[in-house]
Amino acid sequence: MSQDEIQVMIVDDHPVFRQGLRDVLETNPSMKVVGEAADGEVAIEIALETNPNVILMDINLPTINGLQVTRKIRAQLPDVKVIMITGYDDAEQVFHTIRAGASAYCPKDITPEALINVIRAVRDGNYYVDEKTMNYDELMQWVEQKIGRFAGPLITDSDELFIPLSPREMEILEHVTRGLSNKEIAYKLGISHQTVKNHMTAILRKLRVDDRTQAAVYALRHGWVRLEDS
């Protein structure tokens, strides 16, 4: 591997889109594709085996979503940079992406040239959102401007702003989208009814929604859950 070669992994469950990304990367002498995955669980295994510099990640994946995959991989490989490439384009989704540990958020219709530039930018420690390359301070400023209205006045500590849904909260939210009651979720997960209620309170607070129906709609609208997996 040459000094400047960037090792990239691709995570997306659409074979044609994966192949398109591979074609873009392989025409660039400074990029090397070291792994591919079509599924969240498999992505974690391959990332740990190949230890890439950069991962191109979809959010809407079978088994577990791209936000969870990003958190799990970065917990074990903190130097890996993750670029979310997704069709779900809104400021709130960018916010959750950054919360999960990604460095960039790109729409799926990004041009090949722009994508190569984003890969280089995040490898060098920068962030890319809203079609702009930023350092950490600029990113925080952007979040404050764009997300301030979404985060609301309840959060005064910017660190708290970046606490993502925990794996357990994400699991409970998935069950909510499938219509299970708190009692049913408690039984299914082998935890107390009160514990589920506590998690639900945290989920509503983090998503800034009023009730479980809104939380379910939010998860589906952002591609965090696939109903056909049930």
Image (cartoon, rainbow, N blue to C red):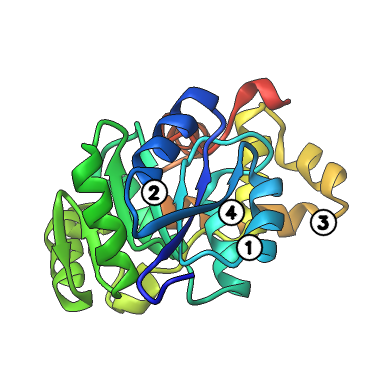
3 vs 1, front mark: 1
Instruction: Read off the residue under disc 1.
Output: 50
* Residues under numbered marks 1 and 2 in contact, where contact means CB atoms less than 8 Å apart: no
Identify residue type, mark 2: Met
- Residue 84 coordinates in the image, percent (x, y): 39, 48
Q: Which of the two discs, 2 and 3, sits closer to the camera?
A: 2
Which comes sooner in the sequence, label 2 or label 3? 2
**Three-letter amino acid code of the residue under disc 3:** Ser
Label 2: few (<14), some or many (≥20) within 10 Å?
A: many
CA gap between label 1 and label 4 equals 15 Å
Nearer the observer: mark 1 or 4; the answer is 1
Please provide percent x and percent y for residue 202.
53, 59
- Please rate how many residues cluster around mark 4, counting C-alpha atoms within 10 Å: few if below 14, some from 14 to 19, many from 20: many
Q: Position of residue 191 (x, y in %)?
A: 83, 56
Q: Amino acid at mark 1?
A: Thr
Name which quarter of the figure residue 6 lies in: bottom left
Sequence-first disc among 3 and 4: 4
Secondary structure, mark 1, is helix
